[in-house]
Amino acid sequence: MGNHKKKPNIMPRHSGGTVLIVVIWITLVLASLVIVLAHGVRVEAMASSNHIAQVKAEAVANGAIHYAFAKLGSEDDSTVSYGANPYEAMHVGEGYFWILRPNLSESRDYSFGLVDEAGKINLNEVSLETMLKLPGMTSELANSIMDWKDEDQDVSAGGAEGEYYLLLSEPYQCKNALLETVEEVLLVKGGRLELLYGEDTNRNGMLDWNENDGQKSLPSDNSNGRLDPGFFNYVTIHSYEMNTDGQGRQRINVSRVQNRGQLAQLLEETFGENKALQILSNIPTAPIRYENLIQFYYVTKMEYGDFAKIIDRLTVDGEEMTTGRINVNAAPEEVLLCLPGLEQSDVDALIRERDGASESLDSILWVTRVLGEEKALAIGRFITTRSSQYSADIIAVSDDGRAFCRYYVVIDTAQGTPTVVYKQSLHQLGWPLDPEILESLRQGIEL
């Protein structure tokens, strides 16, 4: 019988431990992959939620625009311009919106509502003398704006034409055409953010903490406890109105002698034949180019109440539209002070009269009850009581507070149907209202 040798064990002595280590490593790798995958899914879920929230905010912003359309189509000018409550924390769909309005009289309280663009100075129509009266305006910038929008190459004192702009480190042409946005003044010689927006860098009309701390943080401010808003809130390039009466009818141009028959017919229909003849006897038959209807009022020697009945049917020119007239019913004190010949006492008296009026101030004739004839005549061609364009600073947020958006829009109603003629994103300026609003929404608290 042969000897049988036992076969050696070829497995390593510690093979069980090695297998365990490999299993552990595999488990760790798989766990890591699961964690990474879970994190990726979580990130995707958060991104998806944020995207949905942003879509909600955008939809609410669009809803705010249509809400403004509805208000403009159903209310009179004074209510549209100065109504505040209907524009604050409005719940629409799956979010809220505010239409923020600068509080020019008190910078420690938020104000809400649409802003009347006719209550501002139109930079495309303004004279140099008027522009120089704007708060924060400099002579250099005012003259440069005049050069920027005129068609010639003549340089005003302190202004600039093409040669100045072509010699800049990043050269461009002098436009020599009208402004298309208010912010375009930043391209003009002397145009600076601190002049346009003042200390109100986020354009919310409020004195925020960083706008009242001197040089500690941007913007640079004088820490005097008051907000310097620059001149942005007092200027526009959007104001115009159609030269028709309240019913859309063509007005009678009293500067044209050929229209005397139409005027006579209007007077007879309104006051009767005898009184019409008496009024006509005061009106010269020779051609006169009336500067404004206040001048024509004084020429006719009509009673205030009588002229008020027909003023909306009259005009002094044949233009299809008039551009840049200031709505004396809506303009703030700073804008009224820009009107020629007016002093602080005159502006104070105008504001007292319109604020305390018991009747509708639906024509410019009311200023004659406050100002003397000379001053009323001086401002007559620059003022109106009609408005056709309104701006809205819209802040919209999703109902969970995850996303918000902000837009500045200008709405034109002159053609009948409200239309957005300008839209500017203000997202980059950050959340302009109380931060607690977002915190409440994120905690599921309804406003």
Image (cartoon, rainbow, N blue to C red):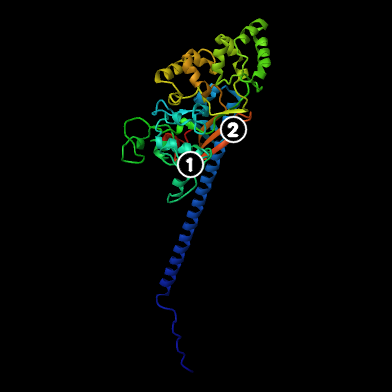
* Residue 61 pos. (x, y %): 54, 36
Residue 394 x %, y %: 51, 34
Q: Quadrant of residue 65?
A: top right
Residue 57 drawn above or below residue 79: below
Q: Circles 2 and 1: CB distance less than 8 Å? A: no
Residue behind mark 1: 427
Q: Nearer the viewer, residue 66 or 3?
A: 66
Counting other residues with Cα less than 10 Å from the Cα at mark 1, is it few (<14), some (14-19), or many (20 or more)?
some
Could you say whether the residue bearing mark 2 is in a helix, strand or loop?
helix
Res 118 visible = yes
Q: Nearer the viewer, residue 38 or 7?
A: 38
**On the picture, is 346 further left or further right than 224?**
right
Report the side of 83 relative to 223 (left or right).
right
Badge 2 amino acid: His
Using the numbered discs, state the Cα–Cα distance from disc 2 to disc 1 in whole angstroms.
20 Å
Q: Which residue is mark 2?
A: 66
